[in-house]
Amino acid sequence: MASADEGPPAGPGPLPSADPRGPVQLSDDAVAVIAGDGTVIGWTRGAEALLGYPAVEMVGRPAALLLAGSPDPRRTAAIAVRSRGGSGWSGLITLRARDDRQIDVDVRVSASFLITGREGFLVSGRERTPQ
């Protein structure tokens, strides 16, 4: 039997979300799949909307091309190690859009997984907006 703290049982309809934007707006986040070697292997419309690059221009290319500054191999390696350990990572990264704008993006990197025999990381993000 459910306790009062657990709330009503789940029924049909949208799932509750801790994010105030709700589950529908979450689907607008930029999402990419990055292979273990740093190559973009998946790119969504949300990523295109945020950065201006269509999938045809990003899939197969190094994700590092999106960084506004020089890649930091030590930071990248630390994020990969953490994600390979199952913890994932989140933080702020400045990316360069197709039109050369620099965009501060709150990024989440999943724990690593295998996709078609390749190591992959699901990377999602949204532009940081001033509070």
Image (cartoon, rainbow, N blue to C red):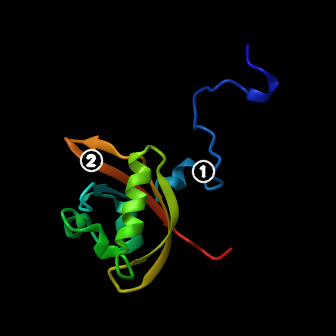
Q: Residue furthest right?
A: 4
Say if 31 sits above or below 4 in the image. below
Q: Position of residue 41 (x, y in %)?
A: 24, 56
On screen, residue 99 versus residue 24, left or right, reads: left
Above or below, 25 against 112 in this view is below
Q: Is residue 85 left or right of residue 64?
A: right
> Badge 2 local density, few (<14 within 10 Å), some, or many (20+)?
some
Q: Is residue 30 visible?
A: no
Confirm whether residue 74 shows in the render: yes
The image quadrant of residue 58 is bottom left
Residue 99, horizontal then vertical, whole percent = 34, 85
- Viewer-side residue, 8 vs 131: 131
Nearer to the camera, 85 or 106: 85
Task: Classify mark 1: helix, strand or loop.
Answer: helix
Residue 33: image quadrant is bottom left
Image quadrant in which the N terminus is located: top right
- Identify which residue is drawn at 37% across, 79% down: 97
User: Residue 30 bears which disc, if any?
Assistant: none
On the image, the x and y values in percent for residue 31 come to 39, 58
Q: Amino acid at mark 2?
A: Glu
Residue 67 location (% of width, % of height)? 36, 76
Which residue in the structure is indicated by mark 1?
Answer: 22
Q: Residue at x 63, y 52 (%)?
A: 19
Which label was assigned to residue 119?
Answer: 2
Label 2 secondary element = strand
- Circle nearer the N terminus (1, 2): 1
Q: Amino acid at mark 1?
A: Gly
Q: Looking at the rendering, in which quadrant would you find the C terminus?
A: bottom right
Crowd around label 1: few <14 · some 14–19 · many ≥20 (10 Å): few
